[in-house]
Amino acid sequence: MRNNACLRLRGRTAARLVSRAVFASVLLAACLMFLASGAAGEPGSQPALLLGAAWYPEQWPESRWDADLQLMEDAHLHVVRVGEFAWSTMEPSPGHYSFAWLARAIRLAEKHHIAVVIGTPTDAPPAWLTSAHPEILRVDAAGHRAEHGGRRQFNYASPEYRVFCATIAGQLAQRFGHDPAVIGWQIGNEYTDESFDPQTRRQFDNWLRRKYGTLDALNRDWTTAYWSQTYDRWDEIPLPTDGGNPGLLLDHRRFVSDTWRSFQQVQIDAIRRYADPRQFITTNIGGLGWSDNWDHYEITQPLDQAAWDDYVGEGHLNVARNAAMHDFARGWKRKIFWVMETQPGSVNWAPINTTLDRGETRAMAWQAVGHGADAVLYWQWRDALNGQEQYHGALVGPDGIPLPIYSEICGIGNEFERASAALRGTKPVAQVAIVVSYDSRWAIDFQPHSKNYDQLQVLLGSYRPLRDERLTVDIVSADAPLDSYKVVFAPSLNVISKELAAHLLAYVTQGGHLLLGPRSGMKDEHDALNIERQPGPMVVPLGGRVEQYYALDGGVPVSGTLGSGSASIWAEQLSKSTPDTQVLLRYGKSNGWLDGQPAMITRPVGQGRITYLGAILNPDLMHRIISWATAAAQIQPEFGAIPANVEVCRRVGASHTVFVVINHGSAAAKILLPAAMHDLLNGGQVGSVELDPQGVAVLSKGTD
Ligand code: GAL
């Protein structure tokens, strides 16, 4: 008889579940409906939508594996990621590989209809390696060499370490590259810390030599006459640990990105040599998505798909931030992505490791899907009995019995199976984009000029109103193709080279509307000031420029044809130089310099338009600006009116559209649908849905 944990759980706690929570009873009903229908996902194929977990079989007796996999199957998990910290088990002594246990774990997973992603173990080299080759250990900015006992203790630039990484990755691929249950590979784990050892410094010198050719060129582009920074030898150039010339700092971040990329490429090559093309290669990007140690576009470029680790940490889901991070992750490769790790309730590394409310984990999983994730994996299945993460959230306790969150995840898995067929082949499709660049982010972060200038908040200032207008938003690199967008917002595009300016101008002349935000175009690709003033090479097409910028310590009134409100944190005094440049907003009385001066200007260019907004505005006025831009571009909302705190996400297929509607609020909400739709979770045609707090509806419109 099928060992069904949904039912077992129901048996144990049914009275409490039914009487205490509407959510739980809905979940239970869904669970039972699923069992009654005998459905098991899409016939004959892996589901399009996968729920899964990070599983570490090496930490448990083999006799326990089947019970764990059975509990996973019962929770409708269809994928596990294994192996990414298991080097000492995979290669217990130099050159002696032990993969038989992994092969048995994979076969057992397969028996439970669970696909496998193998992580290469290069984030945690074994002790025999680090003790025999201490030169592969990273050196931090203070000059301390890492010791064994943690993870991420390796030097990403070490050629010796890369040989070890290529060897273990190649060995794994030889063994599992044709395994039918292995669907993909994850390289390492959350690339994090760079190294500041002498060897890395030499590599940086060589990187600069390759880039500039001559020291004269480097000295010119970095303006090294300033503070006697002129270099006469390549090895005089520091590996920056604590500030420095902005040109040097920007090149160092590019070097770090390139070095992680080449670290990764060594393993891609080793795996591709043996692995079936159907097996994807990815890596899991950490840092809560927005980290900027290195360029995410660079790193994901050679990968088959992007994946990121979506953690809340302390508190609750920040809906807009998390939504934006999914859209950002989708933009790295401009395609569907995976959430490779997310928290089952709580983490162990936040200042206060609060737990997500009941239902919030489900809302979060569906938000990921709504924004373009085709897989969501919990970290982790079961906490190791010892090790640094004993307090982290998990699905199963140390006794091997499901924890309370397991029932919620069982419900999510059930729902993923129900909606999977309809979501197959669908993706978010946007008419508007927000563009970003790592050069710009780094350049502002090196010299923020105001501690309150938070680039993510500035981005969200445009993002939130677009989402409130019920629009899908792509967040893409500024140099990505833009022709499919009617409006493109560039919230803080600080670095605009001539090439980037040409790309943006081509978009505008062909009919696009480019809306540049504060600090745009101040710098060139060497992080040097553009001599045209802001927005640099865009000054002439805009027919206007920034005369002066001001960091604010209070509010400044702003008003004009688009309404009135206030600027804070940052304000730029603009001017116009052509008669057809129109002033849309002006500052009111303030520091004298800004009084009465333009805050926002716009000009038709070719078939399109360039607009420059020089201030961070209050949300209401920002919303009016967004509405003005979308209305002028004749962009219609993708869905009907929705109550506050309800989020709607759209995924478009060839002949149908799927909407994921989530009530993130604390009160029940009724949503009238713009047309009758098929309710993928509960069945039937519906014209409206009522959602409890954290409630989710997944609706399909069209001929699927
Ligand atoms: C991630 C990491 C996992 C685990 C998790 C805990 O950053 O990739 O291995 O440590 O954090 O939240």
Image (cartoon, helix red, strand yellow):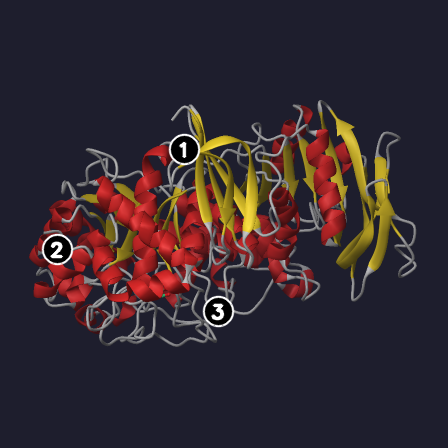
Closer mark to the observer between disc 1 and disc 2: 1
Query: In the rendered image, which residue does mark 3 sit on?
Result: 314
Mark closer to the observer (3, 2)? 3
Cα separation between marks 1 and 3? 33 Å
First in sequence, mark 3 or 2: give its number: 2
Residue type indicated by callout 1: Thr
Asked if the residue at tag 2 contacts the one at tag 1, i.e. Cβ–Cβ closer than 8 Å, the answer is: no
x then y, percent, for residue 77: 26, 51
Numbered disc 3: secondary structure = loop
Q: For the residue labelled by badge 1, is the local secondary structure a helix, a strand or a loop? A: loop
Residue name at image x 23 percent, y 46 percent: 35
Q: Quadrant of residue 605?
A: top right
Q: Could you tell me residue 27's position as x and y percent?
A: 35, 53
Query: Does the beta carbon at disc 3 come under 8 Å from ligand 1?
Result: no
Of label 1 and label 3, which has the lower sequence position? 3
Marker disc for residue 689: none
Per the rendering, the mark at residue 105 is 2
Q: Residue at position x 55%, y 59% from top?
A: 666
